Amino acid sequence: MNTRHVTSLVAAGAAIVMLLSGCGSTGTSNSSNASDSNIISVYGSEPAHPLFPGNTTEAGGGKVVDQLFAGLVTYDAKGGIHNEVADSITSSDNATHYVIKLKSGWKFTDGTPVTAHSFVNAWNYTANSANKQASASFFSTIEGYDDLQKPDVDPKATLSGLTVVDDNTIDVKLSQPDSAFPVKAGSHAYMPLPESAFKDPKKFGQHPVSNGPYKFVSWQHNHSIEMVKNPDYKGNRVAKNDGLNFKIYTSPDSAYADLRGGNLDFTNTIPDTALTSFQSDKSLKAYNEPGGNTLTFTIPEWLEHFGQNEEGNLRRQAISMSIDRKTVAEKIFHGTATPAVDFLAAPISAYSKELKGNEVLKYNPSKAKELWAKANAISPWSGEFGIAYNADGTAKNWVKAICNYIKNTLDIDAKSIPMSTSDEFLSNVDSGKMTSAYRSGWGPDYPSADNYLVQLYDSSSADGKGGNSGNYKNPEFDAMMDKALSAPSTEEADKYYQQGEEILLQDLPAIPLWNQNATAASTSAISGVAFDYGGGPVFTALTKKQ
């Protein structure tokens, strides 16, 4: 059996052949955390959208979708990829043509088979702008994508680059080289969907039929999402437990209190109030490991004084240099975060501490004042500067801290703006209705710099088609990303990604703050806690003593 180990980025030359075999609620005590079952109750937040994989770009829904669906490939803890539903993914013509062979015998939880049509129909649905799926930009390099973004597009129009050869074969033609295609093929956007998803999308989003490690049971909005082990799952992530109950909380403090009280089994969201004590709490098991998540805040260009121009860039740089990241990390994160030096995270191969222009990420009050004065010479400052965040998360203290730094350094009115729930907050972000800066960040969908850079800052990901919620557009940056995707090796691709980052350090479409560790806590009965390449918990590995 031929194998190829792929790390944080796959760069294709003339051919890449992979035949990789994969070995609200405050949390009341009426959960399925029963002592006589191996159902694991875990921290959750209300998903921002119905449970369509291609429309899931936030943690609340992402954690759920990850457990329900299986894609072409999976990722190991080091970022290597292993075939899941795919039997092989073969590249040719300088990574502009891929042939995907599927394994036979896979089926959805309604008993229908997983075929090439299941993937192609799902990809077409997600890519078509008429369906308003948040991950449409993941398909931007496939032929026909631009036609699907036209305002009057037929909702049934499809990507011209996709062909179903037979039930187990997909032919993919790209409009440009994309060496990261085999890597992102395991992300939410690329998950297959059964025919029932298209017959009644509204019903499916509330009660998904899937093909992953778990089978959906119920979604009681703002209370819980329950799933049980899928006995027909044939992939790499076989569950060691009988199921999961995502208990939905509006406060991490409430979840942590439930954990300490034995009414929750596991959480990977440690509240600020517990960061100094959770690792020494003898009533729990604590975990703190390096991770791949980034914390940022976004200043959208539609705000007055913050256009993508000289004044806007000067103000963003001034604000960034007003913040003492090291002190905030020590005082608030207590050893669970490190100051950002670029737009990536340490597990990604393109990560670098030596980028030209990264001094904008260092605390320098005098330089910040100088840059702010230069911006005022272009257009005098007026109004206040606010940073919005969801109050049901863990951003409150650090948002307040950086607002204080901005206020004290630049002598302007800067304040934090709480929004009640993640649902409300993300709805405003996704619809482009934010009237202030807002907290942002990223937990990777796949282990590549492409995921952090193209999906967050490329023009193809703007205008509601991807994660570029601030609608940043810079043709120079886009061109550098295209060069990275065309590179014949990981090392060469990383050079282009880093040059692209140096452009971002000038424009600062988002302001990098910290890289977060993977932190979690569980009751003493839980074992098997592990984290993936990005620092997310591996829920399938959790087990509970009976």
Image (spheres, helix red, strand yellow):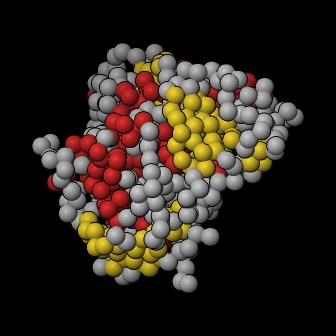
* Residue occupying image coordinates x 83% and y 39%: 524
For the C terminus, the quadrant is top right
For the N terminus, the quadrant is bottom right
* Residue occupying image coordinates x 64% and y 48%: 539
Can residue 531 be seen here? The reply is no
Taking depth in this image into account, of 82 and 50 the one nearest to the observer is 50
Counting from the top left corner in percent of width and height, residue 71 is at: 46, 59
Residue at the extreme bottom: 1
Instruction: Name the image quarter holding residue 300.
Output: top left
Counting from the top left corner in percent of width and height, residue 180 is at: 41, 65
Left or right of 91 on screen, residue 522: right
Counting from the top left corner in percent of width and height, residue 49 is at: 41, 35
Taking depth in this image into account, of 482 and 239 the one nearest to the observer is 239
Q: How many marks?
A: 0
Taking depth in this image into account, of 534 and 188 the one nearest to the observer is 188
* Residue occupying image coordinates x 50% and y 77%: 19
Residue at the extreme front: 111
Left or right of 108 on screen, residue 543: right
Counting from the top left corner in percent of width and height, residue 360 is at: 49, 42
Looking at the picture, does residue 200 appear above or below residue 303? below
Instruction: Name the image quarter holding residue 492.
Output: bottom left
Residue at the extreme right: 282
* Residue occupying image coordinates x 59% and y 26%: 249
Residue at the extreme left: 152
Taking depth in this image into account, of 169 and 304 the one nearest to the observer is 169
Can residue 307 be seen here? The reply is yes
Looking at the picture, does residue 74 appear above or below residue 95? above
